[in-house]
């Protein structure tokens, strides 16, 4: 499993465009918001956590089509499915999801404090939003693995993946934004929505790889 994780990381960094495309798209989403809502700094600070989360969610969806597509094109996906049948297929998918998150989504989390400053967010809001992105974005990768596995055999499955994954990722978005707002708005709590967000990630880490493994098994038959 460790060798598979390192292999996917090397392939992602060798391709070079995955993480960079996600960060550029994330930056483009955040940079266009002030042009739409105006130069009101108080308004930007108020909607900043929601905008960061929406940008991160869309950026995560952008790269999900590459999760299994490259392996299918070079024939290694069939070998991975056959090898996984002898062990735990869901574990193989889980490792690939973690490698995808590390290479493509973690740079978005690292870039979010800088973009929070761009949105005039307070320090507490930036820290809380970054923490919720760190905890919540793996859930999007795990949920997206099931959609990517269903659409891997399609020639242009990127749009289908977004249609399948986006409704399932809405709870992650809701509790991530709620926890971020709770850190800066005194009456609103931070810990309850944050714990629910962590629970969603743990739940997705179990259900998502299992569903993706089943889809890959029947999709490669």
Image: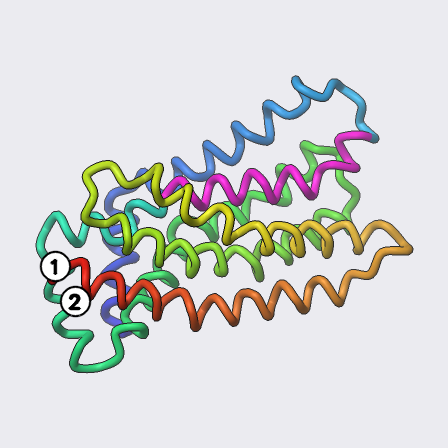
- Residue 12 screen position, x and y as percent: 28, 50
Identify the mark at residue 197; answer none if there is no mark. Answer: none
What is the spatial separation of the Cα atoms under label 1 and label 2, in whole angstroms? 6 Å
Q: Examine the residues drawn in magenta and state their main secondary structure.
A: helix
Q: Which mark is residue 76?
A: 1
SS label for mark 1: helix
Left or right? Give the position of 42 relative to 195: right
**In what quadrant of the picture does the N terminus appear?**
bottom left
Establish if 53 lies above or below 143.
Answer: above
Q: Residue at x 67, y 32 (%)?
A: 118
Identify which residue is drawn at 35% across, 47% down: 64
Q: Residue furthest right?
A: 187
SS at mark 2?
A: helix
Magenta region: 43-63
Q: Is residue 202 above or below residue 161?
A: below
Residue drawn at 74 percent across, 36 percent down = 47
- Residue located beneath label 2 in the image: 80
Q: Quadrant of residue 78?
A: bottom left
- Residue 62 is inside the magenta segment: yes
Q: Quadrant of the C terminus?
A: bottom left
**Residue that appears at 76% across and 66% down:** 191
Residue 104, horizontal then vertical, whole percent: 40, 48
Q: Is residue 107 above or below residue 208?
A: above
Which class describes the residues within 10 Å of circle 2: few (<14), some (14-19), or many (20+)?
A: some
**Residue 45 part of the magenta-drawn span:** yes
**Picture coordinates of residue 195, whole percent (x, y):** 68, 69
Tag 1 and tag 2, C-beta contact below 8 Å: yes
Q: Dot 1: few (<14), some (14–19), or many (≥20) neighbours within 10 Å?
A: few
Is residue 174 placed above or below 58 in the rendered structure?
A: below
């Amino acid at each position: 499993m460790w060798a598979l994780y390192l292999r996917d990381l090397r392939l992602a960094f060798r391709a070079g465009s995955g993480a960079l495309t996600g960060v550029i798209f994330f930056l483009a989403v955040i940079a266009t918001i002030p042009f739409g809502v105006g130069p009101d700094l108080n308004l930007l600070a108020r909607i900043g956590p929601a905008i960061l989360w929406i940008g991160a969610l869309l950026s995560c969806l952008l790269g999900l089509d590459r999760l299994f597509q490259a392996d299918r094109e070079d024939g290694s996906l069939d070998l991975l499915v056959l090898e996984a049948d002898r062990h735990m297929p869901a574990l193989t998918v889980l490792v690939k999801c973690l490698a995808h998150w590390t290479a493509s989504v973690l740079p978005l989390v690292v870039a979010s404090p800088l973009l929070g400053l761009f949105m005039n967010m307070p320090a507490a809001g930036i820290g809380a939003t970054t923490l919720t992105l760190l905890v919540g974005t793996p859930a999007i990768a795990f949920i997206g693995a099931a959609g990517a596995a269903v659409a891997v055999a399609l020639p242009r499955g990127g749009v289908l993946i977004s249609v399948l994954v986006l409704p399932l990722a809405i709870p992650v978005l809701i509790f991530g934004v709620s926890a971020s707002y709770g850190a800066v708005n005194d009456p609103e709590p931070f810990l309850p929505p944050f714990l629910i967000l962590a629970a969603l990630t743990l739940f997705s880490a179990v259900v998502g790889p299992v569903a993706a493994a089943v889809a890959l098994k029947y999709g490669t038959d």
